[in-house]
Image: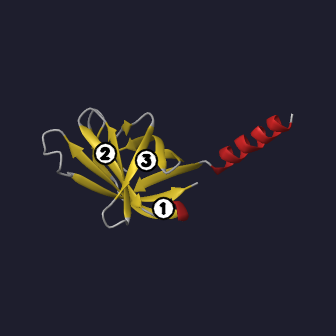
Amino acid sequence: MKFIILAGIMLCSVAVSAQTLTCESLKKIEGWDGGNTYEKVKLSAHLSDKKIVDPVLNGAYKASYEGALSGKVSTNSKWIKYKYLQDAWCWYSVSVPADFNNQKRFAGFIDMRCEGYSFATVINSIQVNCQLR
C-alpha cells in the first residue's frame, strides 16, 4: 500500500513540474496557407528532460514534429538549437538561450531552410519572444 501511495505522489510531482514552451514572433511575416498570409509565427511545445516534445508551429508557417527533439549546445555555449520541424518544403530549427530553464521569459529564434536552396542557407531567421509556463 505504501508503494502505491508513493508512486501516486511521484506521478503528481512529475505532472506539476511539466512545463510548456510558447514562442511568438515579434512581428507579422509573410507566410503561406493556400495563399499569402501576414501573421505572426507561433510555437508551442512541452519540455521534458531538456527536450522539446511534440512541437507545433502555427500562424505564418505550419509545421510539427511528433516526438522529442534533442537540443545541441552551440560552440560558444550560449544557445541550444533544436532541429527540425518540417512541412512539405521547409525545415525549421528553434534556438533558445542555454539557460532558458532558469528564465520565465526570453528571446529566441526560429530559422527556416527550404528546398531550392543550399541546406546550409537560412532563408529566414525569425526573432521570437518565448516563455515557460
Residue found at x 38% / y 44%: 59
SS for callout 3:
strand
According to the picture, the residue beneath numbered tag 2 turns out to be: 92
**Which of the marked residues, 3 or 1, is nearer the chain's N terminus?**
3
| Number of residue marks | 3
Tell me which label, 2 or 1, sits earlier in the chain: 2
**Within-10-Å neighbours for mark 3: few <14, some 14–19, many 20+:** many
Q: Nearer the viewer, residue 30 or 52?
A: 52
Q: Are marks 2 and 3 in contact (CB under 8 Å)?
A: no
Residue on which disc 1 sits: 100
Q: Is residue 36 left or right of residue 97?
A: left
**Foreground of the two, 109 or 12:** 12
Circles 3 and 1, Cβ within 8 Å, touching? The answer is no
Q: Could you tell me how far apart the alpha carbons at marks 2 and 3 are, in whole angstroms? A: 11 Å
Q: Amino acid at mark 2?
A: Tyr
| Viewer can see residue 104 | no
Which numbered dot is residue 43?
A: 3
Is residue 122 shown left or right of residue 103?
Answer: left
The residue under the point 40% across, 42% down is 58
Q: Nearer the viewer, mark 2 or mark 3?
A: 2
Q: Residues within 10 Å of mark 2 (few under 14, many from 20)?
A: many
Which one is earlier in the sequence, the residue at label 2 or at label 3? 3
Rendered image: mark on residue 68? none
Secondary structure of the residue carrying tag 1 is helix
Q: Is residue 40 above or below residue 56?
A: below
